[in-house]
Amino acid sequence: MSRADDPQVPGRRRFFASAAGAVAVTAIGPAARAAAAAAASDIEPFWGMHQGGIATPQQAHAYVAAFDLTTAKRADVIGLLRAWTTAAARLTRGLPVAASTDDSGAEPADSGEALGLPARRLTITFGFGADLFIKGDVDRYRLAQSRPEALIDLPRFNGDKLIPERTGGDLCVQACADDPQVAFHAVRQLARLAYSAAKMRWAQAGFVPSYSKQETPRNLMGFKDGTMNVPVNNRALMDQFVWVGAEGGWMRHGSYLVARPIRIALEHWDRMKLGFQEQVVGRHKRSGAPLGREYETDALDLDATDSDGNPRIPENSHARLAAPESNDGAQVLRRPYSYDNGLSFTAERWPPWRQGMEFDAGLLFVCYQRDPRTGFVKIFDKMSKFDMMNQFVTHVGGGLFACPSGAAEGGYIGQTLFEIA
């Protein structure tokens, strides 16, 4: 291994421009060793049984993108996945996308906007959409027989306003990092590598507040988001709800990703009284505790009533409808991010039916599960019909993707699929 490829050397910081091209510069002594240790702690592993970005402690920023394949050749798809895997392994170590740094007289190997930035816990997660296996009636890549049963076409839920240009895709990439430019840079490099085989269909950036790791982040409604979540350090629960088992065949050790941009009518929400907001969510806004309780981690008491005999946590509140107790124990691993796309012209679908320029902002809902039929679909079908929050939120796009197991060093993401198909 060359010194330039050593993951213990600070990532992109070691590359400096010169008249002869970028060269590696290595410091020596205690300061260099401290910097190397800091860089190593900034790196999330890429190779392994599971892909990163699923059980990884949530990073501050995400960039999710879907791609449509433009090639008709199976070999091109395999070639793209090989190139993406190699690139992702480098990017997640804080390295430029390609080993060569001599770009004189040629297209630069790396676009360069992340030079000088460390890895910042970058993870890159890949997923396969249903159209990869069969699009319409065309089995483009001889994969139709290998489409997992769990990779369903999501039903159209009550209230969906899905924009075709922001929905679906053959391939999906989720880049997460503690720096927004690192996450964007990663997707940009993968898009550059795909120019001859795929084009971007939709993308959405997201962020979470920079609280301490022990504090649940708040969404743009001001409420804590993710209190009731599968604990990633509980292997038994992760195996039960998140990781695909032997039933999945080539998908074993993978997971199914549902990603959905959900626009929030912030102007409408902000006019609601605090008490009503808490009734909608089913939790106290400041503490995150269930209504009638004191602490965020207190269990939901779905049998508790108020002085009038009404449920203390309303029957159509978000917390009650999403609770495992209301869904035969179903759970998903949520990794949501807020998003802000500026302003856009909007016609609200609930009274007072305002039209005009409003925030194009909301929640980039991201969740992983062992089977979407017993995870997201089971939970959200009920929520889409009865959740009080629906008067403030609209699902506008996204998709379902099969995220295979991680890759062994020297292999590529999805290799098991193409070897059996």
Image (tube, rainbow, N blue to C red):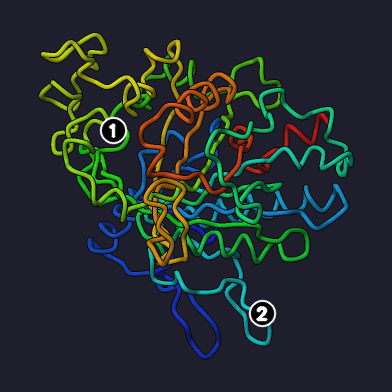
> Which quadrant, please, contains the C terminus?
top right
Nearest to the observer: residue 364 or residue 54: 364
Type of the residue with mark 1: Val
- Mark sitting earlier along the chain (2/1): 2
Does residue 412 lie above or below 326 as drawn?
A: below
How dense is the environment of label 2, judged by Cα within 10 Å: few (below 14), some, or many (20 and up)? few
- Please give the name of the residue rendered at 33% of the width and 48% of the height, measured from the top-left corner: 41
Residue 125 is drawn in which quadrant? top right
Tell me where residue 408 appears, x and y as whole percent.
62, 37
Residue 176 appears in the rendering: yes
Q: Which residue is mark 2?
A: 107
Residue 8 appears in the rendering: no
In the shown orientation, is residue 64 left or right of residue 223? right
Q: Which residue is mark 1?
A: 280
In the shown orientation, is residue 63 left or right of residue 405? left
Tell me where residue 221 appears, x and y as whole percent.
28, 46
Tell me where residue 334 appears, x and y as whole percent.
41, 34
> Which quadrant, please, contains the N terminus?
bottom right
- Please give the name of the residue rendered at 55% of the width and 36% of the height, measured from the top-left corner: 257
